[in-house]
Image (tube, helix red, strand yellow):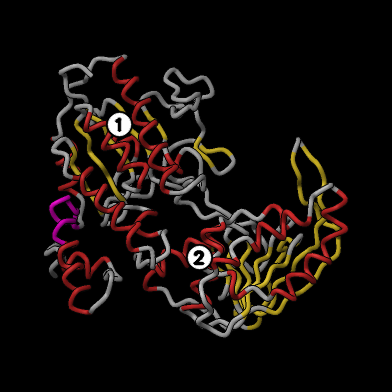
């Protein structure tokens, strides 16, 4: 990049945003990083299972390194979007040479089924954010009961099942899986934490039940059995008296309850058909009811439709003929100078390693774009004035350092591996930013 200073906004300080911002700042751009949450980290801070302390601390160390770059300004507790503190159009008016949107998939993906508003019906992100202490989810009272169903068969389902069994003392967790056992999407590494609770007799009965349907499409039942049971050899020991089970080839079609409280989940049995080179699940018309206290949808996420970028099928629309592709991928939105990376580019795709690579590649696309234009030589003044005009505490990187020091001290005092405040108010107070009446 030439000597002139480009002025770039990055929205969202999860792994994609932080690594993208680091790439831009390292190349000499002046980066202003806006974050909805007080703390940086996104899903690396609030989406990883709590016990993975080593992994999380390793990531935080890298994030601190990115934040320490003198070319980077950080504004936390600032929501960008049509319903936020600053709109995307306002940001554009400040004269940024480019904007990288890496705000993740902040929308909530529902199926539009009857009973989704009952108490006891939740989306996975509510639960994961709750047990990872992200306000306001950390302050929500969840109704878990004894029998829980999780819709989905990925790593998020495994994490939530672990939490329900180990922390919430539920008696039975059932994974409702739309397709067959060979198409479960969790990793062996994650499943080893849950597999000891699998009711093996029930699992064999379930395999026998779905055998005719999977064999019709030449799907090998043994592949499915191996995929699920592969982690048995390294299984964590049981620490609770609970059962985990699968219900394959089933799709939720509605929930019902009494006095606003969930009591039943209705599912429809599926069969498999070959479609567009892959397998698709279609309903057989046979419906069943399962007694449950809790249903959690772990079916992925979608972008926030009120953010300010055009959307299509749960995603922001990308330029199909990008001028600056990286690895044949378009990181360009349909608006000139606005780029998307991480889950803002492709919702629910991959984990932290993916987000890091995608955010970095998005930044490389931005850098190519910047090389094609003259810098506007915009200054920070308009941004600073807007930030000062917001009637709320704004968090800087110095504030984040203070908060981390207080939480580390608190963890040491309590003899914990990690301590997090459960509310924004407590965090602001710890940083000396609490609003006074």
Quadrant in the rendering for residue 314: top right
- Earlier residue among tags 1 and 2: 1
Q: Residue at x 16, y 44 (%)?
A: 68
Instruction: Name the side, left or right, on which 379 lies relative to 369.
Output: left
Q: Quadrant of the C terminus?
A: bottom left
Q: Which of 67 and 120 is in front in this view?
A: 67
Residue 370, image x, y percentages: 29, 20
Residue 33, image x, y percentages: 25, 42
Residue 12, image x, y percentages: 33, 45
SS assignment at label 2: helix
SS assignment at label 1: helix
Residue 106: assigned label: none
Residue holding disc 1: 92
Residue 159: assigned label: 2
Residue furthest out toward the front? 233
Task: Tell me the crowding category of disc 2: few under 14, some 14 to 19, or many 20 or more residues within 10 angstroms, Cα based.
Answer: many
Q: Residue at x 65, y 61 (%)?
A: 228
Q: Residue at x 40, y 37 (%)?
A: 357
Residue 419, image x, y percentages: 26, 71
Q: Is residue 127 above or below residue 41?
A: below
The magenta region covers 393-402
Dominant secondary structure, magenta: helix
Q: Nearer the viewer, residue 428 or 280?
A: 280
- Circle 1/circle 2 CB separation < 8 Å: no
């Amino acid at each position: 990049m030439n000597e002139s200073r480009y002025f770039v906004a990055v929205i969202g300080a999860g792994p994609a945003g932080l690594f993208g911002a680091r790439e831009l700042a390292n190349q000499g751009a002046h980066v202003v990083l806006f974050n909805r949450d007080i703390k940086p980290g996104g899903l690396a801070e609030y989406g990883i299972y709590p016990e993975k302390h080593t992994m999380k601390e390793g990531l935080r160390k890298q994030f601190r390194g990115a934040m320490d770059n003198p070319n980077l300004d950080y504004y936390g507790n600032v929501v960008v979007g049509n319903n936020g503190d600053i709109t995307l159009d306002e940001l554009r008016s400040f004269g940024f040479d480019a904007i990288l949107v890496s705000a993740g998939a902040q929308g909530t993906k529902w199926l539009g089924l009857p009973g989704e508003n009952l108490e006891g019906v939740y989306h996975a992100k509510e639960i994961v954010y709750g047990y990872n202490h992200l306000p306001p989810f950390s302050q929500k009272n969840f109704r878990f009961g004894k029998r829980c169903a999780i819709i989905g068969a990925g790593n998020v389902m495994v994490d939530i099942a672990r939490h329900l069994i180990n922390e919430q003392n539920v008696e039975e967790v059932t994974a409702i899986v739309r397709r067959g056992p060979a198409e479960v999407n969790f990793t062996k590494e994650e499943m080893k934490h849950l597999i000891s609770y699998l009711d093996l007799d029930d699992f064999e009965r379930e395999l026998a039940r779905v055998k005719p349907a999977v064999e019709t499409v030449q799907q090998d039942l043994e592949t499915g059995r191996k995929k699920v049971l592969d982690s048995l050899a390294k299984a964590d020991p049981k620490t609770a008296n609970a059962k985990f089970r699968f219900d394959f080839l089933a799709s939720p079609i509605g929930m019902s309850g009494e006095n606003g409280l969930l009591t039943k989940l209705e599912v429809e049995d599926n069969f498999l058909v070959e479609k567009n080179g892959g397998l698709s699940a279609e309903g057989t018309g046979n419906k069943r009811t399962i007694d449950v206290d809790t249903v959690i949808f772990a079916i992925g996420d979608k972008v926030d439709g009120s953010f300010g970028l055009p959307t299509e099928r749960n995603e922001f629309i990308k330029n199909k003929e990008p001028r600056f592709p990286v690895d044949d991928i378009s990181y360009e939105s349909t608006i000139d100078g606005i780029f998307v990376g991480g889950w803002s580019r492709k919702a629910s795709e991959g984990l932290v390693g993916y987000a890091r690579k995608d955010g970095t590649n998005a930044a490389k696309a931005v850098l190519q774009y910047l090389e094609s234009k003259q810098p506007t030589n915009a200054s920070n003044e308009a941004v600073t004035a807007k930030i000062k005009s917001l009637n709320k505490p704004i968090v800087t990187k110095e504030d984040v350092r203070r908060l981390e020091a207080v939480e580390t001290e608190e963890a040491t005092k309590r003899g914990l591996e990690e301590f997090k405040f459960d509310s924004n108010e407590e965090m602001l107070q710890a940083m000396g930013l609490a609003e006074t009446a």
